[in-house]
Image: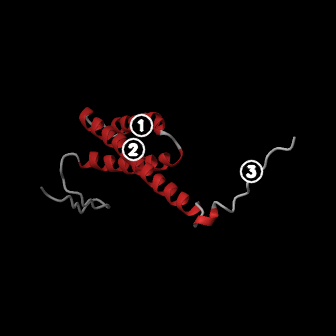
Amino acid sequence: MGWDLRANNRSIALLPEVAGAREGATLVFLAIPSLLVGAVLAQRFKVLVLLPSTAMVLMAAAVFGLMESYTIGSTILVAAAGSVSMQAGYLFGLGVRYLLEARSTESSQPVGAGASARRAAPTAPLT
C-alpha cells in the first residue's frame, strides 16, 4: 500500500491508495452533517420528522453515488451510514433536550417550605 505523492500534480494527495477511499470521503461528508441535522431536529420536532429527513438523506446518497459513479454496494453503504447517523444525532439531540429541560425545571421551582404558603389563597365567588 503506497502513498500517492505525484510531483506533476499541483495538489498532493496524502490519502493512502486503498480501494474505497473516495467512498469513505463521501461517507464522512454525508454522515457528519446528518448527525448534526438530526441533533437540531430533535430540539424542535417529534420522531416522525425522521421519515422525510431520512428520505432526503437517501436521495442525497443516491445523487452522490450517481455523480461519482459508485457501485450499488458503495451507494447503499453511504446511504445507510447517512441515515443511521441522522437517527443517532436525533437520539443525541433528545438527550440534550431532556437535560436542558430538567435543568430549567430545577431552577424554576421555588425553594423552601414557605414558598407554597406564599401563594394567594383561592377566594370564593361572590353571589
Residue at the disc numbered 1: 54
Up the image or down, 93 lies above or below 72; here it is below
How far separated are the C-alphas under marks 1 and 2?
7 Å
Residue at the disc numbered 2: 86
State the residue at coordinates (44%, 51%). Answer: 93
Q: Nearer the viewer, residue 44 or 26?
A: 44
Amino acid carrying mark 2 in the image? Met
Residue 105: image quadrant is bottom right
State the residue at coordinates (28%, 59%). Answer: 9
- Coordinates of residue 11 in the picture (x, y in percent): 31, 60
Mark 3 touches mark 1? (CB < 8 Å): no
Question: Local crowd at mark 3 within 10 Å, few (<14), some, or many (≥20)?
Answer: few
Residue most toward the right?
Answer: 127
Q: Nearer the viewer, residue 26 or 2?
A: 26
Mark 1 touches mark 2? (CB < 8 Å): yes
Residue most toward the left?
Answer: 1
